[in-house]
Amino acid sequence: MVKKLNIIVAVCLLILSGCTAKKNPVVHTAECEKWVVDAYREWMKHDYRDTLLPAQLFTPEMWKKLGRLTAVTDADAMLRAQDYSDYGVESVSCRHLGGDWYQVSYAWEEGGVPTVIPVRVKKIGDGYRFTDVTPYWGEWSGDSLFDIKPCGKVTQKDALEFVRSFYCNYAYLYAMMVPDLEQKLQEMRQKYCTETMLRTIAHTIEEMQGDIGGDCYDPVIMSCDFDIYWFDSLNVNELGEDSFAVSYRCSKDSEQRFKVTVVRQSDRWMINEVQSINE
């Protein structure tokens, strides 16, 4: 009987290990490390008019994210710099951190302090793609970074809970880099913003065309992006009967704050205005 039980347990363990392997495929670290180094060198030297290279290096979601991050920081988020040096290209190195995460480092000059950047890489088909990069304001914490508590539905319980739940859900779309981000954002705007706010959004976006970050600026969050590292700091406080202060911390020394005004339309709360709060 004991022998039979041992056989059953062994079979179950084999099945479970097989399932785990499928869910968490082991990345060939040496092969991937070489790909990361080669990819970084190509990225540093590439002509920004080249429209083919990004598709070879990034997933579509990450490519769009990179554009937003670059607009927020005014620097190439993959490099944490606006330019590169010949020595920097040659000094690129990579080591495996764990799971799908790798640490890239390079120096501007010999003996210089290296820039260290954790990146996430996925095996897609026969190749690899970058799926995330850690910005300068966030420390690497692996995939646990993406364990965000669900926001729940946007509630109409009262004005305060409406604004809190709206911004939680809206920011979540950015933080998780959902594949259909633009469509989902637009759906939320159409559902929860007044015609006045929708006209303001359209006018602001049109007015900013040609400016740095103008292609991605979102008047609802008053930024080009809502990074996953900012999510836990998202806060909403009441200012008046129908106005609220929304804030989130972008880094240790930087906080974004703006005033959100709501109105009641057809028994529903709606976002009517978003204004910067000047200290």
Image (cartoon, helix red, strand yellow):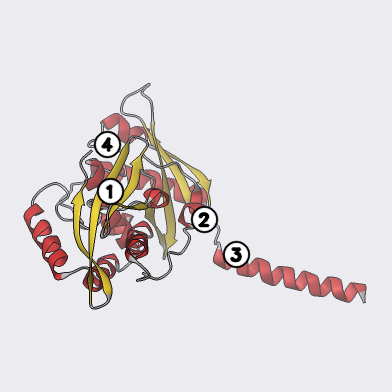
**Residue name at image x 10 percent, y 52 percent:** 208
Task: Look at 40% across and 59% down and name the residue there.
Answer: 127
* Circle 1 crowding by C-alpha within 10 Å: few under 14, some 14–19, many from 20: many
Q: Earlier in the sequence, mark 4 or mark 1?
A: 1
The one nearer the camera, 174 or 81, is 174
In which quadrant of the rendered view does residue 202 lie?
Answer: bottom left
State which tag comes first along the sequence, 2 or 1. Answer: 2
Looking at the image, how many numbered discs can be counted on the residues? 4
Residue 67 makes an appearance in the image: no
Q: Label 4: which residue?
A: 81
The residue where tag 1 is placed is 69
Tell which circle, 2 or 4, labels the residue nearer the N-terminal end.
2
Type of amino acid at the residue the image marks with label 4: Ala
- The residue at which mark 2 appears reads as 27
Task: Residue at 49%, 46% (x, y): give it.
Answer: 141
Distance in Å between CA atoms under marks 4 and 3? 38 Å
